[in-house]
Amino acid sequence: ALQDLISGEDLSASNVDLSLNCDMRRNQLKRKFGRKFECSCFRCTVESGDGDLKEISIMEGIRLGDLAMQQSRYRDAMRFYDRSFELDGKNAEVMHARCASRLAEGNYLSAQKMWKEAFTYFPEH
């Protein structure tokens, strides 16, 4: 395991390339397990827009946001970072990630406004 496990914690094993986006992962699974197979894991559910982001933790939101940014899925990244920001609005990493996702999407004014706000909390950043 990549981290310590807690007794009773759910474990999962991937049957697809996790660097792919949700639709591509789901298509791979359908080819492997049949066209009626529908993945309902937390990540696929949240990335497809069917899941409730209220169940996501700060670190999970950052991790999913970072992955979305790497895949050029900037709107998804914004959703994940915004949820993490709702949970901890004074987290420098979350604030920076929110700004970067706006910038990547081309929302320059929004990114600039957010960076100004972040600077009031983290002038050394």
Image: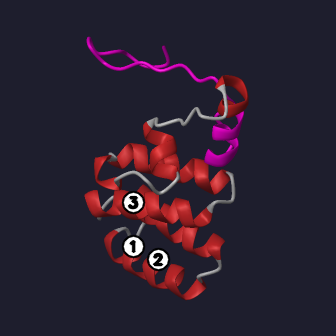
Question: What residue would you read off at disc 2?
Answer: 115
Q: Residue at x 65, y 79 (%)?
A: 106
Q: Residue at x 26, y 11 (%)?
A: 7
- Per the image, label 3 sits on a secondary structure element best described as helix
Q: Position of residue 35 (x, y in %)?
A: 66, 34
* 98 or 119, nearer to the observer: 98
- Per the image, label 1 sits on a secondary structure element best described as helix
**Amino acid beneath label 3:** Ala
Q: Is mark 2 in CB contact (under 8 Å) with mark 1?
A: yes
Name the N-terminal-most of marks 2 and 3.
3
Quadrant including the C terminus:
bottom left
Please identify the residue farthest to the bottom as the structure is shown. 109
* 63 or 35, nearer to the observer: 35
Q: Is residue 109 above or below residue 46?
A: below
Q: Is mark 3 in CB contact (under 8 Å) with mark 1?
A: yes
What label sits on residue 92 in the rendered view? 3
Do we see residue 88 in this rendering? no
* 78 or 116, nearer to the observer: 78
Q: Quadrant of residue 95?
A: bottom left
Question: What residue would you read off at disc 1?
Answer: 118
Q: Position of residue 88 (x, y in %)?
A: 28, 58
**Amino acid beneath label 2:** Trp
Q: Quadrant of residue 73?
A: bottom right
Span of residues in magenta: 1-28
- 102 inside magenta stretch: no
